[in-house]
Image (cartoon, rainbow, N blue to C red):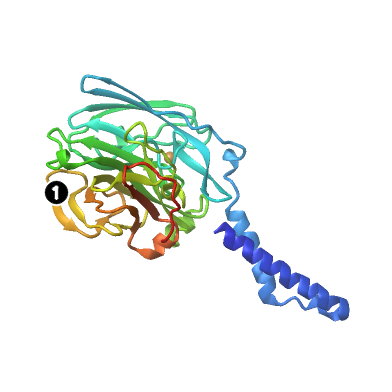
Amino acid sequence: MLKKLSYSIVGLSAAVLLLSACAEETKEAEHEVSPEIENAIKNVNAEERTNEVFKPHQGINQDPVPLEMERDGTDVYVKMTAQITDIEIEEGYDYKAWTFNGEAPGPLVVVNEGDTIHFTLDNIDPAVPHSMDFHAVHTAPNKGFADVAPNEEGTFSYQATKPGVFMYHCGTDPVLAHIANGMHGVIIVQPDEGYPTDDEVDKEYVVIQNEWYKYNDLDDMTNNVPSQVVFSTKALHEDQANTNGTVTAVKNEPLLAKVGDKVRIYVNNVGPNEVSSFHVVGTIFDDVYIDGNPANHFEGMQTVMLPASGGAVVEFTVKEEGVYPFVTHQFNHATKGAVGYVKVTADGKDDGSEVSGH
Ligand SMILES: [Cu+2]
């Protein structure tokens, strides 16, 4: 979006230069700036205004902090921050994101079916209340997902009774602005009995899809199409990458596998508005568990539809070396960034080879 804006400014400058050149030849021309150009200048200014940083957040860029998580039997104590952190969602374009822990999507949370979560939100955003809505729990939202005021902490307890790949997000009004500004993430609740295909899986990863709109512009978030649609990956195991949702995140940090591997991806589409048609180019999903629940088992799927907030566990086999892009098959969104890579090599390590295509 910013690129487009700068192109149009360059275009305008050229037009203005051209006009000035004409003006030197005939003085009357000075008064002949066309209404179209005047309007275009006004629109550029309007666009710049909508990109102005929300006043109380000006100059704030809070460093990311690690997720705090401790277990005592089946009681799990999770602590996160709500904070304001710059995220470079596209080369040269920093978005002053509203985040959990300085990441967008926020940190990955993994618990077991039946665990009780004791969640603390430390709201270090100095200006805006925030909250936490875990899709993995049953609670009265006005109590369990209540707002936490700026510079305060709130603690909430609930049980994770169903296995799955669930979205979490800030639920503070206007919810759309809080989610679209970056306050979303994924919680995996691991099934008690596991998945029937656990023994077949060689590699497993987490992938999240989200959209970005004009900075903090509720009108754009409500009525327009996203400026960027992106993937991120969160480290499920220690040696894995942990990225924000940016247009190049899972191209620069491809998922790795070796020839013959069965790869599992825990995938979620946090939206906030768009559906994802999740597809891995060059393969077919052997097994799919919709929303990550082992009871929702499908086989032989080409594309899995993820509603906004929806998740899945998808498993596929990579039969030869190469680069397998994954996309949302809504290609208008793939074009805006929603492409990542699974890189398959003989030994499962990144051979440093160039990735191209898509
Ligand atoms: Cu919020």
Dot 1: what SS? loop
Q: Is residue 177 above or below residue 40?
A: above
Q: At which x and y percent is residue 36?
A: 66, 75
Q: Quadrant of residue 116?
A: top left
Relative side of 72 to 21, left or right:
left
**Nearer to the camera, 213 or 338:** 338
Residue 125 in sight: yes
**Nearer to the camera, 234 or 131:** 234
The total number of labels drawn is 1
Q: At which x and y percent is residue 337?
A: 44, 56
Q: At which x and y percent is residue 260?
A: 23, 48
Q: Is residue 124 above or below residue 297?
A: above
Q: Crowdedness of circle 1 by 10 Å Cα count: few (<14), some, many (20+)?
A: few
Q: At which x and y percent is residue 103?
A: 45, 38
The residue at which mark 1 appears reads as: 296
**Nearer to the camera, 322 or 21:** 322
Ligand 1 occupies quarter: top left
At 25% across and 31% down in the image, what residue appears? Answer: 111
Q: Is residue 147 above or below residue 95?
A: above
At 43% across and 54% down in the image, what residue appears? Answer: 355
Relative side of 25 to 163, left or right:
right
Q: Amino acid at mark 1?
A: Asn
Identify the image quadrant of the C terminus: bottom left
Residue 169 in sight: no
**Nearer to the camera, 165 or 223:** 165
